[in-house]
Image: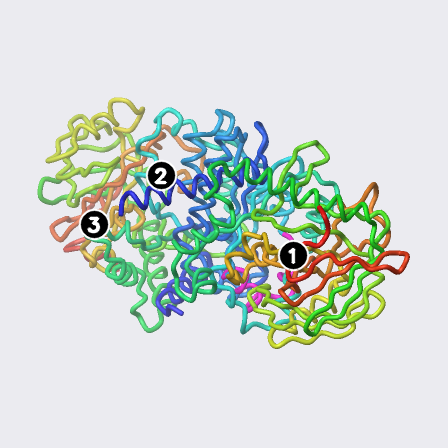
Amino acid sequence: MAARVSDNGKRLERYAELAVRVGANVQPEQEVFVHGLVEHAELIRALTRQSYRAGAAYVNVLYDDQHVKRAMIELGPDEALTHSPEWLTTLTQRTAGNALLGTSGNPEPELMADLDGDRLGRAMPLAVAELRREQHLAQNVNWCAVGAATAGWACQVLGEPDVERLWELVAFCFRLDEPDPVAAWREHLDRLDARAAALTERRPDAIRYRGPGTDLVVGLLPSARWGSARFRTSGGIDYVANLPTEEIFTTPDCRRADGTLCSSLPLSLGGQLIRDLQLTFEDGRIVRVEADTGADIVRTHLATIENADRLGELALVTKESRVGQTGKLFYNTLFDENATCHIAYGNGLPYAFDGEPDEGMNVSNIHIDFMVGGPQLEVDALMADGSEVALIRNEEWQLAA
Amino acid sequence: MDERLERYAELVVRVGANVQPGQEVFVLPAVAHHELARALTRQAYSAGASYVHVLYNDGHVRRAMIELGPDGALTYSPEWLKTFFGSATGNAMIVITSDPEPDLLADLDGERVGRAVPKELVQIQVQLLGENAVNWCGIGAPSERWANRVFGEPDLERLWEQVAFCMQLDDPDPIGAWRAHVARLKERTAQLNELRPDAPRYRGPGTDLTVGLLPNVGWMAGSLETTGGIEYVANMPTEEVFTSPDARRTEETIRSTRPLPLSGQIIRGLELTFEGGRAVRVEAESGADLVRSHFATIENADRLGELALVTKESRVGQAGLLFYDTLFDENATCHIAYGAGLPFLLESEPDEGFNIANIHVDFMVGGPELDVDAVLADGAELPLIRGEEWQLA
C-alpha cells in the first residue's frame, strides 16, 4: 500500500508539473494564481510546489467553495449575487502579466439542483467577469485549466467513489502513460494546428451540422481563424489553455445561425445538469430553449446576460481524442468538450482572428460550451461558391490535414 | 445537515461576532475546517450579512513557499490580501484558530520558517484589531488530529461532544445561555472594578502569592464593544475575568495545578518563586528548562502579565480535559501569565508597572483548594474565590 500511495503522489506531481510547464508554462519570476475548490487541495498543493520549482516569485492560492456560493444564492440578499468584492477585483487585476492555473472537477455536480434557477443564473461577480473578459481580449495571462479527481466526481463518472480509477482516466487523457508526455503533447498539438491551418486556408463561408434533432447552419467570418488551445500571450509566452485539449475551434459570425441544434451529452452547469438541450436559432439569436432538465438556467442566461443568446464558438473534435476514447461521460466541460464536437453560446474568442476581431464576433460576459458531436453527426463546410466539403463523418476527419 | 454544527455556527455568529444586518462577514478558516466554514457562512447570511467572504488558508501552500520559494516570497504581502483585510474595517470577522497540523513545518529550516512573515499584512491585521473597529470572534474547529492529541485516538465525535459541552450547545437555548453567561462575567468585572483591590492573594497547596495591581488597569471579561458600539465576544469559549498586574509587585510562590503544553513539551508541577516582581526560582516536575530559558533569554518574561479568575461554572473546567489548545485550556480554571501585559486593559498611558515582553504564557493555578482574596488598600482582606466559587455578592 505504501508503495502505491507514493506512486500516486508521484503521479500527482508529474501531472502538476505538466500543467505548470506545458499548460500555463510558468516563467521564472512570474507570480502564479491558483484557483480551485477546497476539495482539490491535494492537486492545488502540488501545483503550488511545481510552480515554485519552475521559478515562480510567489504563488497566490484562492480556494473556492461551492457551499459558500450555495449559501449566498439560497440565503443572501440580491445584491450579493452579482457583487465583486474589492479584494477579488484586485486579485483579478494582478493576474495580468502573470500565470493562472485553474482546477476543475465538481465533487457535487448537483449541489445547486434545488435552487431557484433565476438566482443561480444571476449569481456572478459582474465586475470580475468583465475584468477576466478584458484580460482574455488582451491575452496577457498565460493560463491553464486542469481536472482534479474527487470522490464526488468519480461517482458521477464511474457510479462509485473510485478516485483512483478516475485519476487513471484523467492521467490517460493527460498522456501521462507516454514515455515523454511533454514531447507527446507537442506532437499532438502540432497535429491539431495542422488541421486548423488547413481549414483556415479553405475559408468556408459556413459550417453545417446534421444529425438526430440537429440541422444548423452557422456563418463564419472572413477574418476568423481556426486554432488549437495552444496560444501565445501578448508578451510572447506560449501556453496551452486547457489540458487535456483535443479540439480545433473558431468564432462564428454571431449574426448568422439558423436551424435547430440538439446537445448530445449532458452538461454540468452551475450545479445543475442540462440534459437534451434543444436550441432553435433565427438570424443568429436563440429564439427557443427546451431541455429535459435544466432549461431554466439556460433561459436565465439568455434573458439576463447581454448577447448570451448568440454563438461564440464552434469546435471540432474527432475520434483520436483521448477523452473520447475513454468512452466516459465526465460531467465536466473541460473533459467532455474534448470528447466530441461542441458549440458555445456567449462570448466569442477574440484571438481566433487574423488581426482585430471582426464586428460579427459576439461579445458577452458568459461562455458556455455544450456537446453536439457523436457518431451520427455530419459536419460540412459550405463554401462561398455553393459547393460543400465534408469535414467530419463518423467522428473521423475528412480533410487531408 | 449537521444540526450541532449549525447550532455552533449560529452561536458564534449571533453571540461571538454578533453579526449585524447589512454587515459584511470575513471568515478565516483552514482548508480542513470547510464544514464549519460553510455552516458559519449559512448562519451569517441568515443573520442578515450583506456578503460573506471566506478566505481559506492552507499550511501546505505555506510549507511549499518556505521550502521551495525564493527569499522574496517569505515576507511578501500580496496586494489583494492587503485589500481583503483593509475591507474588514467596520465589518464582522470570524477566525478559526485551531491549527489542523501543528507539526507541518517541523522539518523545515527554522531560520526560513522564522522569517516567513508577511510584514505589511501583519501590520494591517494588528492595526485592524487595535482600532477595535471589527466585531470578531476566535473559535476552535474539532478535527481528527486534534482529537488524537486530546484522547490518543482520532475520535472526532468524542471531541465534538466535549467542544459542544464547553460551548453550552446542549442547552435548549445556547444563545440565551451565553448571553446570561457573559452578563454574569461582566457583573463580576463590575464588582472588581468598583472594589479596586490593591492586590489579589493566592493561597493553596504550594502556593502563597500576592500580586499588586495598577491603578490605571481595570478588570475585563466576557464581551467587548467596537468603536461603533457593537458588542462581541472575542474568544469562545470564555470563562475568565482578567487583568494585568503591577509587574513590580509580585511576592512569594505559586504552583501550577494543571499540565501546560508548550512548544512541544508538557510543563508539569511548575513552581515559581517571586521577589520584587521577578521570578527568582523555577522548579517543575517536567519542562522546567524551557521556562528557565524563557526567563533567561526574553526580556521581562520573568514578570507577570495577566491574572485571570475562573470558577467552577466553567464548562471547560468541568470537561476535565487537557485540550492542548490555549483557547480552551486557559478557561478551565484560574490562570496567571508570565510575560506581556494586555494593552487593551490600559485606561491611560502605561506606567513602568505594566509589563512589556515578547512572550505571553498562561499557566493554570486554580482548583478546589485555591483560595483567592482581594487585599484592599486599607489592608482589609475580602474573599474572592473559595472552593472554586465566586464570593462577591
Badges 1 and 3, same chain: no
- Label 1 chain ID: A
Decide: few, some or many residues near mark 1? Use Cα within 10 Å; few <14, some 14-19, many ≥20. Answer: some
Query: Mark 3: which secondary structure?
Result: loop
Q: Which residue is mark 1?
A: A396
Depth-wise, is mark 1 or mark 3 nearer the camera?
Answer: 1
Q: How many marks?
A: 3
- Rendered image: mark on residue B322: 3
Which stretch is magenta?
A: A67-84
Query: Mark 1: which secondary structure?
Result: strand
Q: Is residue B42 above or below residue B129?
A: below
Of the residues shown, which amino acid type is indicated by label 3?
Answer: Leu
Depth-wise, is mark 2 or mark 3 nearer the camera?
Answer: 3
Q: Which of the pair A286/B368 is nearer the observer?
A: A286
- Image coordinates of residue B73 in percent, x first then y, are 50, 29
Q: Which residue is mark 2?
A: B215
**Cα gap from disc 1 to disc 3, whole angstroms:** 68 Å
Is A82 covered by the magenta stretch? yes
Looking at the magenta stretch, what is its main secondary structure? helix
Of the residues shown, which amino acid type is indicated by label 1?
Answer: Glu
Q: Which residue ends up furthest to the right in the rendered image?
A: A385
Q: Is residue A75 above or below residue B291?
A: below
